[in-house]
């Protein structure tokens, strides 16, 4: 059984883009859709049996009709080619209030053939392209409202709530794992952060601190007494999964727990310069259903996609003409900057500020897709900082969170202000519903 695991598409991220005159849409929307096209093309051409999407189809919880249409076109091309899809709900797919539909519910409502939506915490059995069955333990995004609905938890601060969420998820997964059929392969699909994950650009797109779950919670929630290890390092018997497929963290990475791979596929496109060096893509997982539990996983391989490049050109000019130094640096990176999103950072000596010709630098960057900025720094240039962080490098919500912490704002007040700020940024209409 061949499973394609990807996550964190975030259709709607359009920073560093421009309007495509041929379509009237953002060129960055085109970037994200072309990355998804590569996923679909690979699945159809390489006998993939199931596509497992681990959350965050869109940037916004209320995606535009255009964004929904373009995502649906590709899902329908996938399932129309005979490859079923499992769509897990991530934090960016969730509605603002209970009772509202998620951004993925429409597939379940319409009963789209070949599409299963993982909206609830629990186990579903899905059928692959060749009719083989797979157990999927779905862990969609769990926000604090999961606990705040209970009276005894309403006044708890963020940290105790996160600890309670960890304990509750462990208990729930212990039950789910105990019910797994040992004769069928099983995977856990989650949209969450675990304690050993290396964070990526998702930190700029979320509010406050996410709960970070233990690796062992995802692979062995019942503890070692209920899941003995074999000499090969794999556990055997009832109550285990063969692979843990995760979304939410944008940096591609793989960890191990109790002999089970715990893998973030990462996002499909770079969203800022913090991801300049990151490789983007998806995982292809090979499972042999005929093997016994603990021995079914044959391989899990990362497959890169062609993602829009981000390029930083750093120039140090302490003598001579800084413009000429910048132009030489650009010429050396000519191949790299073609169709890339580019920023130029120039370190100047005192008194050189007036010698830097921005217009000449922009002309030299004509082959770039987008010029993100030309910054200059001189020894006497003031820097705006919050602690050790440059304000210019912060997303709005990060700056707000650091400001509130610097003012020693109470935790509950901080979370409320951050939530309001996030809603205001993503949807002024939604934010107005919270206003007193």
Image: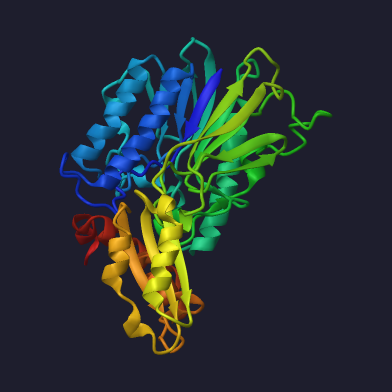
Image vertical order of residue 435 relative to residue 115, above or below: below
Image vertical order of residue 35 relative to residue 238, above or below: below
Which corner quadrant of the image does residue 302 belong to? top right
For the image shown, how many numbered marks are present on the structure? 0
Pick the residue in front: 366 or 114: 366
Residue 149 horizontal side relative to residue 61, left or right: right
Pick the residue in front: 283 or 209: 283
| Quadrant in which the C terminus is drawn | bottom left
* Residue 398 visible somewhere in the drawing: no
Q: Position of residue 304 (x, y in %)?
A: 50, 37
Image vertical order of residue 240 relative to residue 8, above or below: above
At a point 52% along the width and 48% down the height, the residue shown is 251
Q: Position of residue 286 (x, y in %)?
A: 60, 23
At a point 47% along the width and 54% down the height, the residue shown is 275
> Most extreme residue toward the top, as rendered?
131
| Quadrant in which the N terminus is drawn | top right
Pick the residue in front: 118 or 37: 37
Image vertical order of residue 254 relative to residue 334, above or below: above
At a point 43% along the width and 57% down the height, the residue shown is 311
Q: Position of residue 228 (x, y in %)?
A: 78, 31
């Amino acid at each position: 059984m061949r499973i394609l695991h990807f996550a964190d598409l975030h259709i709607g991220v359009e920073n560093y883009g421009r309007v495509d005159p041929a379509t009237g849409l953002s060129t960055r929307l085109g970037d994200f859709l072309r990355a998804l096209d590569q996923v679909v093309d690979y699945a159809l051409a390489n006998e993939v049996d199931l596509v497992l999407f681990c959350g965050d189809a869109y940037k916004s919880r209320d995606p535009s009709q255009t964004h929904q249409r373009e995502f649906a076109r590709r899902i329908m091309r996938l399932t129309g080619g005979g490859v079923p899809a499992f769509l897990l709900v991530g934090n960016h797919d969730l509605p603002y209030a209970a009772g509202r539909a998620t951004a993925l519910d429409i597939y379940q409502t319409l009963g789209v053939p070949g599409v299963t939506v993982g909206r609830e915490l629990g186990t579903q059995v899905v059928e692959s392209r060749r009719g083989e069955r797979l157990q999927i333990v779905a862990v969609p995004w769990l926000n604090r409202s999961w606990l705040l609905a209970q009276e005894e938890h309403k006044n708890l601060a963020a940290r105790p709530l996160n600890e309670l969420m960890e304990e509750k998820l462990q208990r729930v997964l212990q039950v789910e794992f105990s019910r797994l059929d040992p004769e069928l392969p099983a995977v856990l699909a989650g949209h969450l952060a675990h304690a050993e994950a290396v964070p990526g650009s998702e930190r700029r797109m979320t509010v406050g601190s996410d709960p970070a779950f233990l690796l062992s919670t995802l692979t062995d929630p019942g503890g070692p007494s209920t899941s003995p290890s074999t000499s090969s390092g794999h556990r055997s018997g009832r109550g285990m999964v063969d692979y843990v497929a995760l979304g939410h963290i944008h940096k591609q990475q793989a960890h191990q727990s109790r002999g089970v791979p715990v893998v973030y596929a990462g996002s499909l496109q770079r969203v800022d310069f913090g991801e300049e060096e990151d490789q983007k893509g998806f995982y292809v997982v090979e499972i042999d259903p005929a093997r016994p539990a603990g021995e079914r996983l044959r391989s899990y391989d990362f497959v890169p996609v062609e993602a829009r490049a981000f390029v930083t050109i750093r120039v140090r000019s302490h003598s001579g003409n800084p413009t000429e130094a910048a132009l030489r640096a650009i010429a050396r990176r000519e191949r790299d900057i073609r169709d890339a999103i580019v920023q130029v950072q120039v370190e100047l000596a005192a008194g050189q500020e007036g010698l830097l010709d921005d217009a000449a630098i922009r002309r030299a960057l004509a082959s770039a897709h987008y010029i993100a900025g030309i910054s200059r720094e001189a020894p006497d240039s003031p820097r705006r900082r919050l602690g050790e962080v440059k304000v210019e490098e912060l997303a709005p919500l990060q700056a707000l969170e650091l400001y509130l912490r610097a003012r020693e704002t109470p935790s509950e007040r901080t979370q409320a202000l951050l939530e309001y700020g996030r809603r205001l940024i993503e949807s002024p209409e939604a934010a107005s519903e919270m206003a007193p």
